[in-house]
């Protein structure tokens, strides 16, 4: 393929600051270092650049030598694969020696180092990830990534099935990059190859699958990606259960940002068993599992109220479970075609911040309650009455509730 070159739209993106200092330190005397991959892609379409990686002809020990000579700290974070992390002004940059795959097993690769940027590009997965740029704004494209980026098309480099067999996680990355960058339909050849190679997902670690899935569910076109994954059997394979697409769609289109765990809860949790299964299948953190448990309680509560709870009941639920239940509540009622009044109330309370209980144990002691279980009893009674009164904040109402809880009423 003919090498294409163009110029970055922003003249300063790699020409100044820490990036420029790094490139100056690593280039010259027969070695060439370029910014590579996602940073170049995002710079071309003016998206934020979160991580910046470089590709270099220099061997890892030479990268370390040059970095340290310039006063930077160099850490051999993945030196067996040619990667050195260089810290410049506190910013970490991954610098990887050009390489070619010697052997792959669907999870990891044995590589050999090289000096050919075209060969390095050919071993990457998607064309829009195989772009390089120098500090002079020149973008180099060996595989057609510029055309695909302009068309917002996510396409594998070369034979799609071969790329997938090198690392089966690329199946999920296909859906992630489609959800984040693509317009129009998913690439037919890529999807067909993913379907043919789907059994390879079974050899991947739970942790790697979790990372990709949560990124898919948080991407711009998450709804479309989840629908395609559902229609092709990938979603049930990953989740080990049934997906609720209408509820997930309602949550994804609602105002406000939902966390990845909230999105997963909307998509895949109906009961506590779902939450526990997903914790195991996806190696979820304790915090993520707790979000799913709250989603399970929410689902059971909605069924018990026949999807027609009052605004007061909704606030009471959010108070007990936590503020992150509000957006999930609104999405669930919308997807279930609940009564219009309930949906409207849910929309109003979805961003409600639960107040803090106005009384503490010290207040009970100061009022003459004996230390011990009686303090907890008084607080519990006051809290229950406060919830039933819909969380009043005016002093007169609070004084009355507290008096009743202390037995003075």
Image (tube, helix red, strand yellow):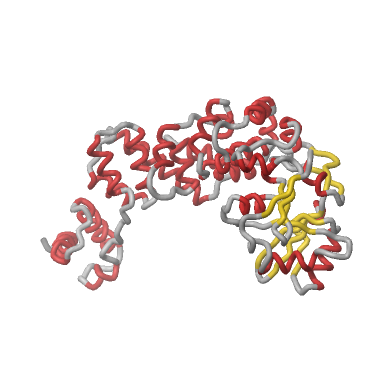
Q: Residue at x 76, y 44 (%)?
A: 142
Q: Quadrant of residue 165?
A: top right
Q: Quadrant of residue 13?
A: bottom right
Q: Position of residue 73 (x, y in %)?
A: 74, 70
Answer left or right for 124 relative to 324. right
Q: Position of residue 72 (x, y in %)?
A: 75, 71
Residue 57 appearing in the image: yes
Count every numbered label the image shows and give the total.
0
Answer left or right for 5 relative to 345. right
Please tell me whether residue 149 is drawn above or below residue 199 in the rendered image: below
244 and 368: which is toward the camera = 244
Quadrant (top left/top right/bottom left/bottom right) for the N terminus: top right
Q: Position of residue 69 (x, y in %)?
A: 82, 73
156 and 366: which is toward the camera = 156
Q: Residue at x 48, y 31 (%)?
A: 243
Q: Residue at x 80, y 38 (%)?
A: 104
391 and 148: which is toward the camera = 148
Please tell me whether residue 110 is drawn above or below residue 133 in the rendered image: above
Answer left or right for 107 relative to 9. right
Residue 281 appearing in the image: no
Q: Position of residue 141 (x, y in %)?
A: 73, 46
Task: Return the residue found at the far left.
Answer: 409
226 and 289: which is toward the camera = 226
Task: Return the residue found at the far right.
Answer: 30
Q: Quadrant of residue 173?
A: top right
Quadrant (top left/top right/bottom left/bottom right) for the C terminus: bottom left
Please tell me whether residue 304 is drawn above or below residue 44 in the rendered image: above
Q: Residue at x 80, y 56 (%)?
A: 56
Please tell me whether residue 371 is drawn above or below residue 44 in the rendered image: below
């Amino acid at each position: 393929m003919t090498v294409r070159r163009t110029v970055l739209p922003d003249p300063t993106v790699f020409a100044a600051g820490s990036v420029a200092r790094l490139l100056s330190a690593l280039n010259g005397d027969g070695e060439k270092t370029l910014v590579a991959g996602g940073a170049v892609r995002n710079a071309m379409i003016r998206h934020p650049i979160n991580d910046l990686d470089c590709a270099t002809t220099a061997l890892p020990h030479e990268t370390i030598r040059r970095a340290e000579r310039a006063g930077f700290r160099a850490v051999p974070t993945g030196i067996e694969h040619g990667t050195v992390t260089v810290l410049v002004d506190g910013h970490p940059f991954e610098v990887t020696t050009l390489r070619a795959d010697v052997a792959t097993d669907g999870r990891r690769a044995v590589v050999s180092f090289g000096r050919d940027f075209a060969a390095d590009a050919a071993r990457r997965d998607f064309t829009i990830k195989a772009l390089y740029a120098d500090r002079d704004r020149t973008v180099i494209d060996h595989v057609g990534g510029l055309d695909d980026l302009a068309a917002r098309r996510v396409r594998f480099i070369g034979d799609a099935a071969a790329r997938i067999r090198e690392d089966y996680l690329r199946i999920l990355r296909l859906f992630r990059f489609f959800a984040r960058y693509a317009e129009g339909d998913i690439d037919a050849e890529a999807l067909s190859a993913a379907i043919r190679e789907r059994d390879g997902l079974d050899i991947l670690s739970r942790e790697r699958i979790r990372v990709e899935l949560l990124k898919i569910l948080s991407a711009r076109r998450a709804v479309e990606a989840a629908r395609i994954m559902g229609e092709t059997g990938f979603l049930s394979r990953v989740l080990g259960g049934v997906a609720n697409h209408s509820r997930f769609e309602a949550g994804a289109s609602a105002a406000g940002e939902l966390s990845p765990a909230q999105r997963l809860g909307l998509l895949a949790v109906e009961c506590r068993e779902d939450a526990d299964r997903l914790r195991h299948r996806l190696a979820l953190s304790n915090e993520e599992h707790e979000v799913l448990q709250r989603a399970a309680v929410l689902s059971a509560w909605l069924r018990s109220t026949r999807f027609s709870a009052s605004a007061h009941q909704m606030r009471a639920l959010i108070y007990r479970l936590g503020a992150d239940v509000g957006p999930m509540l609104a999405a669930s009622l919308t997807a279930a075609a609940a009564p219009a009044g309930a949906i409207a109330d849910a929309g109003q309370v979805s961003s409600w911040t639960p107040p803090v209980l106005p009384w503490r144990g010290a207040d009970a002691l100061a009022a003459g309650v004996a230390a011990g279980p009686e303090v907890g009893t008084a607080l519990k009674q006051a809290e229950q009455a406060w919830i039933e009164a819909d969380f009043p904040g005016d002093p007169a109402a609070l004084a009355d509730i507290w008096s009743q809880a202390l037995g003075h009423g």
